[in-house]
Image (tube, rainbow, N blue to C red):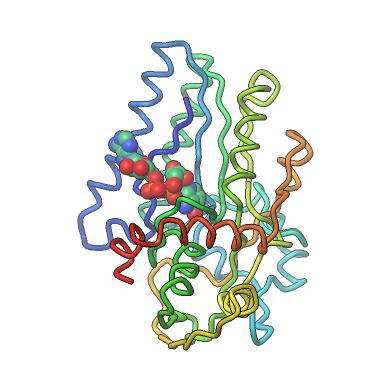
Amino acid sequence: MIECSAEPSVMAGMNGNPSYVINSNLVGTLNCLEAVRKNKATLIFLSTSRVYSYDELNKLDIINMGIRYDYCYTSVVANKGISFNGVTEQFTLAGPKTMYGATKYASEIMINEYAAMYGIKSVINRCGIIAGPGQFGKTDQGLLALWVFHYLFDKELTFIGFDGKGSQVRDFLDVKDLYRLIEIEITKINELKGNTFNVGGGRINSMSLHELTMKCNSIFNKKLKVNHSIETRPGDIKVYITDNENVYKIAGWKPRSDMTDILTDTMQWAKINKEKIRVLFNG
Ligand SMILES: NC(=O)c1ccc[n+]([C@@H]2O[C@H](COP(=O)([O-])OP(=O)(O)OC[C@H]3O[C@@H](n4cnc5c(N)ncnc54)[C@H](O)[C@@H]3O)[C@@H](O)[C@H]2O)c1
């Protein structure tokens, strides 16, 4: 079973009622685990980088390089969970994570418990931002698709939070690369079972909103107006970049797509589905 169902919004529960996100994410995983146990199946779980606390990540020494934030050398030296590549699996799991992150982490704990008690073979992938064709682009999930939709419909962009300068950084994982990793994990489940991997686009595919906008301007050959909203959304993170070293060492996987590939593929798909996307995007 590939457990990739979720309420994936980091804003979920902020309206004061967390029952929907808890039921979808934690209870949903428990239902999957029971099905896996009863059917003697194996489990691949799509978890999230959001299991790492936004507070702990924002407490790191971070350098503001004008157009992007990045981890300071002092963070790499002082924190075993930060390398020159980014965040490793050694990063603390303490601290607030949003309801989304907490429910995914609770699911991870239960997966490991089922593995210990019932011998279920499982792999956990803590994914950074996933991107590529086929994704709904919303302000709280699906950032790269959201950017592409703005270029498709010539809409004004908005940099939200952290002074509204678009300096916040994420790494982008092509869904094709993620698919390739899941194939490896299914094929080699006996060898890979019990592992928890950080999985993302990595430093090479990391960009601030500002850099993403410059890249889109150049690839799509147009310049959109950018608005600036200074209010930072609760639970937002200045910089998250995945260190893929562990998954590379153990599973032999690393991303192949670069940002040009991901943006080009997403735009190609968006153009084909323009009228359907217009309805969702209000374009
Ligand atoms: N998109 C990202 O950047 C990202 C990053 C890290 C991890 N993930 C994880 O990847 C997985 C897929 O996320 P996505 O971004 O494609 O989100 P998505 O919303 O496009 O897909 C989630 C799917 O789960 C389904 N679902 C929700 N509750 C369900 C239930 N109770 N039973 C059956 N199906 C249910 C939804 O209908 C939806 O089709 C999720 O587990 C998410 O936590 C996503």
Residue 57 percent across, percent down from the top left: 57, 64
Residue sitting at x 61%, y 58%: 262
- Residue 27 seen in the current view: no
Question: What is the quadrant of residue 156 in the picture?
Answer: bottom left
Query: Where ligand 1 lies, by quadrant?
Result: top left
Please identify the quadrant where the C terminus is shown: bottom left
34 to the left or right of 117: left
Query: In the rendered image of this protein, does residue 221 appear above or below residue 280?
Result: below
Give above or below for 117 relative to 70.
above
How many numbered marks, from 0 up?
Answer: 0
Closest to the observer, 205 or 169: 205
Query: Image point 65% across, 22% down: which residue?
Result: 187
Tell me: 166 left or right of 64: left
Examine the rendered structure and indicate whether residue 23 appears above or below residue 101.
above
**x 42%, y 66%: residue:** 235
Report whether 70 appears left or right of 129: right
Q: Position of residue 256 (x, y in %)?
A: 73, 49
Q: Position of residue 11 (x, y in %)?
A: 34, 61
78 or 91: nearer the viewer: 91
Q: Nearer the viewer, residue 86 or 5?
A: 5
Q: Within the image, what quadrant is residue 64 found in?
A: bottom right
- Up the image or down, 258 lies above or below 46; here it is below
Q: Position of residue 88 (x, y in %)?
A: 68, 51
Picture residue at 64% right of the left edge, 61% below the top: 241
- The answer to whether one can see residue 30 in this image is yes
